[in-house]
């Protein structure tokens, strides 16, 4: 089995790049990120930034020397660079190459024939030949549309405006995966190189339909009146080809229409018939986790009576209820005279709930606060979903008696 220790990531931004970078660092790989000269990219600790000329295969080859694996998450508008990167990786002796895919099943003949996937299919052919010649190995990752990203930007359904375009009626099942799970899948591939070599790797968090997502959103509090319309993906495909025939075709029209055809069109492989979740260490999410992707977040903050804690609470209250459902602000003393600003905020914003936490270092006090939080969640109908985010801002002072000489 090939052992992977050093990994280069190209495309650390975008929808899936940050999640993959985070997963690689947490898995203790030695991570290098390639960026153009003069890039203002900032990276978390644990990753090294290497500036390189993406137009130069020799420069890319030098940057990839000594690297065990290459992961590309380049977006569609940067696919022109990927052939040079793959050529350089092969020349540098990179052991495993994972090209930019992370979407629909492009090994499906109907999907691969769509023009939007032309560059991805071409990259696959290059990698297949290189692997057959013993020069490298590869893994192609199919994960369907990104579940969290697709909900955030309104591609799957629009939970902010309570609207959706139901493709082919909205009842066609499709495989979907969160960005975090894609990151975990990459780690799983690099840790199980033999089982994932020279083939497509299928991963998914869930198989859902658009109408099921709407139902889950309603269970999570999106209970207003939903506006929907139905679109025929065959007509979208026709419109995409028509757009491509124009002198200056708009990629926001033709590209996304083709993608929608691949996700929801009959026979395009939108629902995976098998997955490699077990191989890469992923578990499919149940309804509770699916609902979390459609619902508003619930925050618990400690130390909110003043300073940073109060400022964070005030800032969260500026977000719409579609993004922030509840703000539970804990304080040592809940009397209005002690926390006038917080009481004023709670009176204006019903999402802000004040909870007493007398002492974060006192177990009894913490348990009392826990009961209070559970009570608020029950009242708000969120007890089954729990908390999403904890912001632990409370300060702790270790009081030590010192005399003048010691000081």
Image: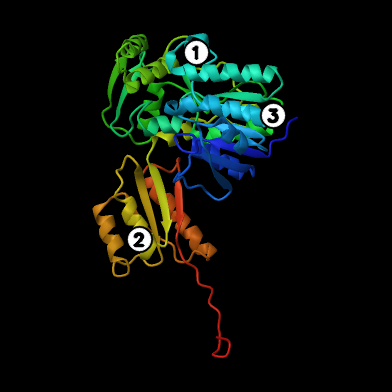
Residue 156 picture location, percent across and down: 38, 25
On residue 203, the disc is: none
Locate the C terminus by quadrant.
bottom right
Per the image, label 3 sits on a secondary structure element best described as loop
On residue 112, the disc is: 1
Report the Cα–Cα distance between label 2 and label 1. Answer: 53 Å
Per the image, label 1 sits on a secondary structure element best described as helix
Q: Please rate how many residues cluster around mark 1, counting C-alpha atoms within 10 Å: few if below 14, some from 14 to 19, many from 20.
A: many
Report the Cα–Cα distance between label 3 and label 1. Answer: 26 Å
Q: Residue at 47% across / 25% down in the picture?
A: 80
Q: Which residue is mark 2?
A: 310
Per the image, label 2 sits on a secondary structure element best described as helix
Q: Nearer the viewer, residue 356 or 393?
A: 393
Residue 138 picture location, percent across and down: 63, 24
Q: Please rate how many residues cluster around mark 3, counting C-alpha atoms within 10 Å: few if below 14, some from 14 to 19, many from 20.
A: some
Q: Are marks 2 and 1 in contact (CB under 8 Å)?
A: no
Q: Residue at 46% across / 38% down in the picture?
A: 13
Earlier along the polypeptide chain: callout 3 or callout 2?
Answer: 3
Q: Which residue is mark 3?
A: 193
Can I make out residue 185 in this image?
Answer: no
Q: Please rate how many residues cluster around mark 2, counting C-alpha atoms within 10 Å: few if below 14, some from 14 to 19, many from 20.
A: many
Residue 15 picture location, percent across and down: 45, 34
């Amino acid at each position: 089995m090939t052992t992977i220790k050093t990994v280069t990531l190209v495309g650390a931004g975008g929808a899936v790049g940050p999640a993959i970078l985070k997963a690689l660092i947490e898995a203790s790989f030695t991570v290098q990120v390639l960026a153009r000269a003069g890039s203002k990219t900032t990276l978390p600790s644990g990753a090294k930034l290497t500036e390189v000329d993406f137009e130069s295969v020799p420069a890319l080859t030098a940057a990839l020397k000594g690297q065990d694996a290459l992961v590309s998450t380049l977006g569609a508008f940067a696919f022109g660079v990927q052939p040079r990167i793959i050529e350089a990786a092969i020349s540098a002796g990179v052991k495993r190459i994972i090209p930019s895919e992370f979407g629909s099943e492009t090994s499906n003949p109907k999907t691969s024939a769509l023009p939007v996937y032309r560059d991805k299919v071409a990259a696959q052919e290059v990698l297949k030949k290189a692997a057959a010649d013993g020069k490298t190995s590869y893994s192609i990752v199919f994960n369907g549309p990104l579940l969290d990203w697709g909900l955030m930007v309104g591609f799957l359904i629009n939970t902010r405006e309570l609207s959706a375009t139901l493709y082919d009626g909205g009842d066609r099942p499709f495989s979907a995966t969160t960005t975090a799970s894609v990151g975990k899948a990459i780690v799983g591939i690099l840790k199980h190189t033999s089982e994932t070599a020279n083939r497509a790797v299928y991963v998914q968090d869930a198989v859902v339909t658009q109408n099921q997502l709407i139902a889950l959103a309603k269970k999570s509090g999106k209970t207003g009146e939903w506006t929907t319309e139905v679109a025929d993906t065959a007509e979208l495909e026709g419109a995409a080809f028509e757009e491509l025939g124009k002198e200056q075709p708009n990629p926001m029209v033709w590209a996304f229409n083709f993608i929608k055809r691949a996700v929801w069109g009959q026979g395009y492989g939108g629902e995976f018939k098998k997955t490699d979740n077990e191989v890469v260490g992923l578990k499919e999410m149940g309804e509770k986790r699916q609902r979390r992707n459609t619902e508003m977040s619930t925050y618990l903050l400690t130390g909110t009576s003043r300073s940073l804690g109060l400022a964070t609470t005030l800032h969260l209250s500026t977000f719409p209820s579609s993004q922030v459902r509840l703000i539970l602000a804990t304080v040592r003393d809940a009397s209005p005279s002690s926390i006038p600003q917080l009481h004023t905020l709670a009176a204006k914003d019903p999402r802000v709930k004040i909870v007493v936490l007398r002492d974060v270092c006192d177990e009894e006090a913490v348990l009392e606060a826990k009961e209070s939080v559970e009570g608020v969640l029950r009242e708000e109908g969120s007890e089954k979903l729990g908390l999403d985010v904890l912001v632990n801002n409370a300060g702790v002072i270790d009081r030590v008696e010192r005399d003048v000489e010691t000081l």
